[in-house]
Structure formats: C-alpha cells, structure tokens
Amino acid sequence: MTEDKWEEIKEMVNKNFEVFENQVFELSGEQGEGTREELVFNGPLGKIKLEMVVKPLVINKKTHYSKRMGTSAKVDYITSETEKVRTLFAYKLDPVEDNWVKIDTAQFA
C-alpha cells in the first residue's frame, strides 16, 4: 500500500466515522527501525482498528551457527536504506472476549 492510499483511508475514516484513537509508535528490532500507526474508530461492524506498519525492506538474511552442542543460531538481517515495506492490518473488537480479532481481507475481494 502506498503512503497516498493510506492518507486517503485515514481521511475517509475521519470524515465518516467517530475516531477514538490515532497513534504512531516507533518500532525497533533486529529487522530495522520502523513505525506502526493505529487508527481506532466505530465502524459499521463495531469497533475497528486499522494498523499500518512501515519497515525497511529485508534484502538478505545471514544465519550464523556453530556445530557445537548447546550453541544457538544467530540471524543478521540486511535491510535497504531507501526502500520501505508498508503493510495494512485490520482488526475488529470482539466484545465478548474484549480482544482484537484479525479481519480476513479475502472476504472483501
């Protein structure tokens, strides 16, 4: 998903629905720095959370291991400095169990 398309979705949600939260979180880890933006709103299916995760593109990964007993493998990720991967996730709040359930996007196709 492109940055422009994500901005269009946010505008549409802000215009048509009651927005509860709009937060941005910084991510760090072995696959590089990134961001996660969450948008929680009251939609036609109930409380919905859209999550956009932006991370650097993983170009290669190297596994370092030893044949000695008791040692573990180490994975080094080589990421792109310029290219980013944008992934959109959608969740629906289950009121009975009070947790987020991932929405299968195949049913919308």
Image (spheres, grey):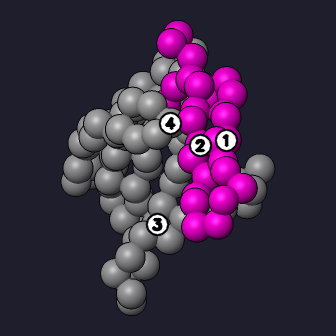
Q: Position of residue 58 (x, y in %)?
A: 62, 29
Q: Which residues are magenta?
A: 54-82
Give the distance between the C-alpha atoms of the residues marked 4 and 2, in whole angstroms. Answer: 10 Å
Q: Amino acid at mark 1?
A: Thr
Give the distance between the C-alpha atoms of the residues marked 1 and 2, in whole angstroms. Answer: 4 Å
Marked residue nearer the N-terminal end (1 or 2) = 1
- Name the image quarter holding residue 25: top left
- Name the image quarter holding residue 57: top right
The secondary structure type at the circle numbered 4 is: loop
**Magenta highlight on residue 15:** no
Do the residues bearing badges 2 and 3 touch, measured as CB atoms within 8 Å? no
Marked residue nearer the N-terminal end (4 or 3) = 4
Q: Which mark is residue 92?
A: 3
Name the side, left or right, on which 108 lies relative to 9.
right
Name the mark nearer the viewer: 4 or 2: 2
The secondary structure type at the circle numbered 3 is: strand
Q: Which mark is residue 31?
A: 4
Name the mark nearer the viewer: 4 or 3: 4
Do the residues bearing badges 4 and 3 touch, measured as CB atoms within 8 Å? no
Give the distance between the C-alpha atoms of the residues marked 2 and 3, in whole angstroms. Answer: 34 Å
Name the side, left or right, on which 68 lies relative to 4.
right
Q: Which mark is residue 75?
A: 2
Q: Position of residue 77 (x, y in %)?
A: 58, 33
